[in-house]
Amino acid sequence: MPTLGSPASSLALPEKRLVSSCVPLDELLDGGLPYGQMLEISGPPGAAREYLAAQFARSAISSGEEVLYIGA
């Protein structure tokens, strides 16, 4: 478990991936979002940004991980 003074890079585990429910996106990301990485999801109004972010969060939570979600 990282301590309060640990660098964020100590959380990265590139071999561990979080999947979305979007197979083409997971393929683009070589199997999903690398664990411990930050992802900014952008797009035009009406795009499914919130849905996609929720899918990654759901994947992490179902794996017993904690999630920090920041929405604007």
Image (spheres, rainbow, N blue to C red):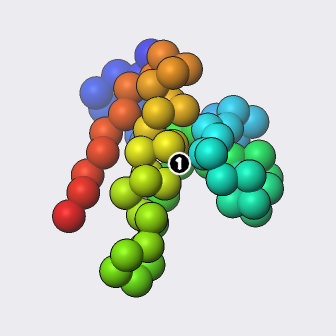
Where, quadrant-wise, is the C terminus in this rendering? bottom left
Q: Up-down: is 43 above or below 53? A: below
Question: Can residue 34 be seen in this snapshot?
Answer: no
Q: Residue at x 47, y 33 (%)?
A: 58
Residue 46, given in percent of the width and then of the height, sits at 37, 76
Q: Nearer the viewer, residue 32 or 46?
A: 46
Question: Outermost residue, bottom direction?
Answer: 44
Q: Nearer the viewer, residue 23 or 15?
A: 23
| Residue occupying the point 40% across, 83% down | 44
> Image check: 28 left or right of 11?
right
**Residue on which the image places disc 1:** 37
Residue 21 visible in this rendered orientation of the protein? yes
Residue at the spot x=74%, y=52% of the render?
23
Instruction: Establish if 63 lies above or below 13.
Output: above
Q: Image quarter for residue 16?
A: top right
Secondary structure state at the residue bearing disc 1:
loop
Given residues 44 and 8, the one toward you in this image is: 44
Kind of residue indicated by mark 1: Gln
Relative side of 3 to 57, left or right? left
- Which residue appears farthest toward the front when viewing the image? 46
How many neighbours does mark 1 have within 10 angstroms: few (below 14), some (14-19), or many (20 or more)? few
Q: Quadrant of the N terminus?
A: top left
Relative to 37, say whether 67 is above or below.
Answer: above
- Residue 59 lies, in percent from the top left, at 54, 32
Horizontal and vertical percent for residue 60?
50, 30
Can you say whether 7 is above or below 42 in the image? above
Report the label total. Answer: 1
The spot of residue 28 in percent (x, y) is 76, 62
